[in-house]
Image (cartoon, rainbow, N blue to C red):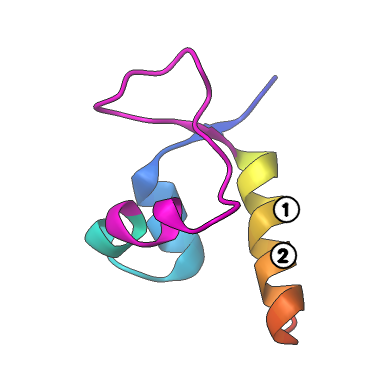
Amino acid sequence: MNDLIDLHDIAAMYRVSYRQARDVITKHPGFPKPVPACSRKKPLWLRETIEAFVRGSYAKQGVSA
């Protein structure tokens, strides 16, 4: 089963506000696209793709997750 997450979950992963997750993080170059079957008003992402992106972005900065 695919685990889907929303902007609230992404904000919690990054420890930022919902607004910052929506306006900054999801617009970062290379950030995964939402799953195609979701609505535009409530985008959803696969948890594994976001976790991989988070690990990759921390690795590029030289920080351990």
Q: Residues within 10 Å of mark 1 (few under 14, many from 20)?
A: few
Amino acid at the residue labelled 1: Ala
Residue at image position (69%, 83%) is 61
Quadrant of the rendered structure where residue 62 is?
bottom right
| Secondary structure at numbered mark 2 | helix
Q: Amino acid at mark 2?
A: Arg
Residue most extreme to the bottom: 62
**Helix, strand or loop for disc 1:** helix
Can residue 65 be seen in the rendering of this structure? no
**Picture residue at 29% right of the left edge, 64% below the top:** 20
Q: Position of residue 19 (x, y in %)?
A: 23, 59
User: Which residue is denoted by mark 1 in the rendering?
Assistant: 52
Q: Is residue 59 above or below residue 24?
A: below
Q: Position of residue 17 (x, y in %)?
A: 28, 65
Which residue is under mark 2? 55
Q: Quadrant location of the C terminus? A: bottom right
